[in-house]
Amino acid sequence: MRILILLPLLLAAVAAAARAAGSSNAPFRPPPRVLMDPPAWYSPAHFKLMGKPQSGEWMAAHPEPAQSFQDYVALKPNLPTQERHTLYLSAVGPIAATDRERLATLREFLELYYTLPVRMGPDLGLKDVTSRDREVFDQKTVRQYLTEDILHQVLMPAVPRDAYCLQGVTMEDLYPEPSWNYVFGQAMLTHRVGIYSLVRFYPAFWGRKDDDASRKRGLLRSLQTLVHETGHMFGVAHCQKYECVMNGSNSLQESDRRPIHLCPECLRKFRWNIGFDIVNRYEALKAFYEKQALTAQAEWIELRLRECRESPATKGG
Ligand SMILES: [Zn+2]
Ligand SMILES: [Zn+2]
């Protein structure tokens, strides 16, 4: 979806900044020996290769260089260190009780997904942030806030000392510059901050009634967005090989077709960076999906778990 990140330039800058700023930091944990991992962990059996991009889709509209695992390692991405390995989430702008519950669920999910501590940061306000009123449909007008101002004035001064990143979540609508209708979010990887709006994921924004199906869809969209954007914070670029949570997408329809899972190539990148145990991670995610009645996601994880456990290299150890 339309989330503005100038990836190739920014990723190089992130790597340089990390080398400069983090050189004295002790590593949070020893780099995992990815080459020794059981091959089943990265088996492509339960993943679909990306088809040819259709007109209007992200890859057709935004050609980007592909990022292989080797490219990723060569980039020397920001690694979590003992001093800086906590992911922070802050509510930005007014937040209803139901939204706060959603944020708690997002926090829990991010922690299981990336296996690093995720903490709620302080609530942040939108005072002095440039805004405008915009007609979105059928004469419905909403207030929109300028992402640049939120990144610079609201988030950057609030980044905690131990933060790997601080991501703001808002239920207000956003725009990145006057010529755009709206934007779902924007990130500044060099400064470890991002702001994302979830408001368009839920039917209330579109003047429609909430029901179980729409609540579930809204939750899935929110989880997917946060996982994707946090992935960029780790220096992982848009995935072009498999259908994957790290695929770029140009619209809500396109992102709704994407899975919430990491493909083998992206999984390997995060495993290399963070060092999690892939089977333990899948087990925790499966329990989360079951609790949230995300049945298809839980079933997919079960297939992967069976594949990983049946692998000869993992048997007995
Ligand atoms: Zn992206
Ligand atoms: Zn991928």
Image (cartoon, rainbow, N blue to C red):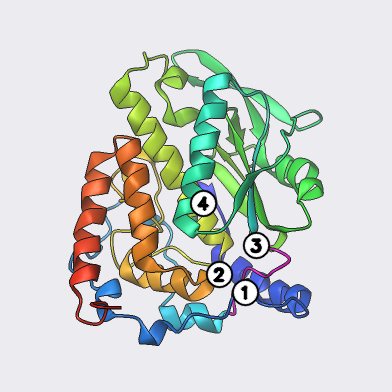
The percent coordinates of residue 155 (x first, y second) are 74, 45
Q: Earlier in the sequence, mark 1 or mark 4?
A: 1
Can the viewer see residue 198?
Answer: no
Residue at mark 1: C-beta within 8 A of ligand 1: no
Amino acid type of the residue tagged 4 in the rendering: Glu
Q: Counting other residues with Cα less than 10 Å from the Cα at mark 2, is it few (<14), some (14-19), or many (20 or more)?
A: some
Name the residue at 56% across, 16% down: 141
Q: How far apart are marks 3 and 1 (CA)?
A: 20 Å
Q: Earlier in the sequence, mark 3 or mark 2?
A: 2
Q: Give the range drawn in magenta.
A: 76-85
> x and y percent of residue 100 in the render?
57, 28
As drawn, is 58 to the left or to the right of 235? Answer: left
Q: Which of marks 3 and 1 is in front?
A: 3
Q: What's the residue type where badge 1 is placed?
A: Ala
Helix, strand or loop at disc 2? helix
- Residue 143 in the image: x percent, y percent? 63, 22
Q: Seen in the image, is 214 located left or right of residue 121?
A: left
**Which of 18 and 161 lies nearest the eye of the viewer?**
161
Q: Give the residue at mark 4.
A: 111
Q: Do the residues labelled 2 and 1 touch (CB within 8 Å)?
A: yes
Q: Is residue 91 above or below residue 8?
A: above
Residue 12's disc number: 1
Measured Cα–Cα span from mark 3 to mark 4: 11 Å
Tell me whether the residue at label 3 lies in contact with that at label 4, contact meaning CB atoms closer than 8 angstroms: no
Residue ID for mark 2: 8
Q: Which is in the foreground here, disc 3 or disc 2?
A: 3
Question: Which amino acid type is marked by label 3?
Answer: His
Give the vertical position of 83 relative to 69 (above or below): above
Determine the secondary structure under disc 1.
Answer: helix
Q: Kindly state the secondary structure of the residue where label 4 is placed.
A: helix
